[in-house]
Image: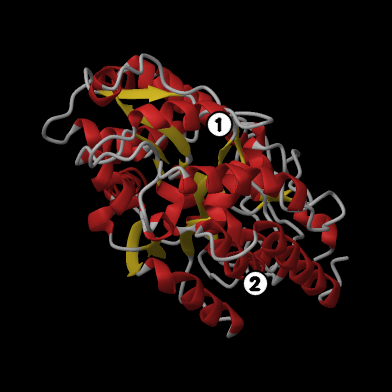
Amino acid sequence: MGTTALAGCGGNAGTSGGNETANSGGTTGTGSESMADSIVFYNAGSLKYDPGTEANIERFEEETGISVEVNEVPWENLKTSLTTIWRNQDQTVDAFNGPTWWLADFVASDWLEPLELSDSHMSNYNQHLQDLVTFEGKTYMAPEFGKWGTYLYDKVHFEKQGVSEPPQTWDEVVSKGKQLDAGNTSAFGFTWANKDVFTFKQFLYQAGGQLFNDSNEPAFVDAGMDVMDFLTELRTEGLIPGGISNMGEGGAGDTFIAGQLASVESWTPLAARTLDSDGWDTDRLGSAKPPAGPDSRATFQESDGIGVSAFSKRKSAAKKFARFMTTPASSKTNMKVEGNPAVIPSVYDEPEIQEQYPSWLLEDMKFNLEHAKSETYLAQPQVDDYLSEQITPAFLGDKDPKEALETAQSNIERLYTDIGLI
């Protein structure tokens, strides 16, 4: 795959009716085999913790008569499992779900089958989501559900501390945070905190930056310094909990629900979980658009999608599964059952969804979907490792931020030079 594959294309190779046709994507399938009566699906983790996907699989089996054998692979092992299978051109897996940031490396290795999703199907998604899953005019993954930053706050705590409105900017996160920091309650936390690269990208986009420019050159130092200055001020002012870099989604969410965080920039499912918790209701939980950085209120887009193996012998059934699992009806089911924010904007206007969630929360969820940003880049594991090893010490005050960013950028530039991307 050439370097142009790093940039998602807005076009689509699918047919207008969604029928499967032969394609030329460098993969092994033609899409012309007869429809199989079963497929093997690799799910990221246990369906016990993924009830929305489980409900949609049941709907698929009932409506199509195609059975789905689910292999529940622990999240931390899934990419390794798939890579091992596909390096051996094994036919074990037909379809899988996983994050869109794996896509560039999988497509570059010719491991994925183009899905041939129709234009009408893809038009359900905002352009930025289409771009994330489309390469050189072909769509290789269908967005299933998403997670992106939403600003939640404890209205009761805000009132006690005399803060009437949530912060609108980074500067106000700091200034109002000094009022909100009281007793055992820290002013601010963020769910991405145990994923330092995600945290960095979230705020990098709000600062108007991105990891790579259009020539595949890493170019994040200048905007990255705005991020480091902001996070350093939060840390030195004591406005975030100690050890914030080790807090996972559960940790930050549990801390917020326990009343130990006045506000949190979080995965949106936390709102649904909070409202189901003791001591919380719509009078206490507040939601707002993320505080704006120097450039925007953009949030980091983390989407999981359905892909189909290039080595599958049941591609027609697997593609049918990918389409079914990513329709508006399936997106709505996922949001109703699990609380995952819908990746399709029209779902937020559905009466069942509006009955289940407060209108102000839906408004913010939809805003964040429309303003989410992300990047897909080759050698993602190595790039993220180079970033992580530098920015985590800088987050914690153990390394000079500019030195950390410059070192990370230099290491990534050398990596991309070595593999011929620049």
Asked whether, in this view, residue 392 is left or right of residue 158, the answer is right
Q: Tag 1 or tag 2, which sits nearer the N-term?
A: 1
The CA distance from mark 2 to mark 1 is: 30 Å
Assess disc 1: are there few (<14), some (14-19) or many (≥20) residues with their C-alpha within 10 Å of its C-alpha.
Answer: many
| Residue 385 visible (yes or no) | yes
Residue at the disc numbered 2 = 382
Q: Please, what secondary structure does the residue beneath circle 1 have?
A: helix
| Residue 29 visible (yes or no) | no
* Type of the residue with mark 1: Trp
Name the spot of residue 202 as percent of width and height, x first: 57, 44
**Mark closer to the observer (2, 1):** 1
User: In this orientation, which residue lies closer to the viewer: 247 or 4?
Assistant: 247
Asked whether, in this view, residue 138 is left or right of residue 172, the answer is right
Q: Which residue shows up at 48% across the image and 27% down it? A: 175
Name the spot of residue 244 as percent of width and height, x first: 40, 54
Residue 123, which numbered label? none
Q: Of all residues shown, which one is farthest toward the bottom?
A: 88
Name the spot of residue 410 as percent of width and height, x first: 79, 68
Q: Of all residues shown, which one is farthest toward the left?
A: 278
Residue 170, which numbered label? 1
* Type of the residue with mark 2: Gln
Q: Which residue shows up at 53% across the image and 31% down it? A: 369
Q: Please, what secondary structure does the residue beneath circle 2 have?
A: helix
* On screen, residue 83 above or below 155: below
Name the spot of residue 297 as percent of width and height, x first: 59, 29
* On screen, residue 91 above or below 391: below
